[in-house]
Amino acid sequence: MRRALFPLVTAAGGWIAATLPALAQCPMCRTAVGAQGPEAARTVNLAIIVMFVPALALFSSVFVLSFRYRNSPRPDEGDDQRSPRNEDDGNDIP
């Protein structure tokens, strides 16, 4: 059920993002684009979405990797076999 729902939610989110005007435009950008016409406004809105995708992908990747490896084994400090106390370099004075 969960696997079937994910593509549907993703498609719905993409459709909503593509049809709504970008509300994240600063007032100066909105004024400049509004004076150029509706085609320029659609182009800027598409550019905002295109620039959002890499940032979202990077954030999602970090989140997924940290969630996936949250229980990975960590080396203990007490089990370090390379410590000088455990090495026998043959230079012991009798």
Image: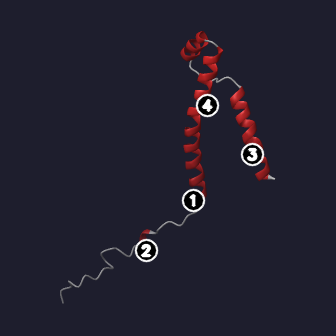
Residue 17: quarter of image: top right
| Element class at badge 4 | helix
Residue 55: quarter of image: top right
| Element class at badge 1 | loop
- Please rate how many residues cluster around mark 3, counting C-alpha atoms within 10 Å: few if below 14, some from 14 to 19, many from 20: few
Report, in whole angstroms, how far the alpha carbon at label 4 lies from the one at label 2. Answer: 50 Å
Amino acid marked by disc 4: Ile
**Which residue position holds label 1?**
69
Q: Is residue 7 left or right of residue 35?
A: right
Which label is found at residue 49? 4
Amino acid marked by disc 1: Tyr
The residue at the point 50 percent across, 65 percent down is 74
Percent of width and height locating residue 46: 62, 27
Which label is found at residue 79? 2
**Which residue position holds label 3?**
7
Q: Residue furthest bottom?
A: 94
User: Looking at the image, is 74 positioned above or below residue 81?
Assistant: above
- Please rate how many residues cluster around mark 2, counting C-alpha atoms within 10 Å: few if below 14, some from 14 to 19, many from 20: few
Amino acid marked by disc 2: Asp
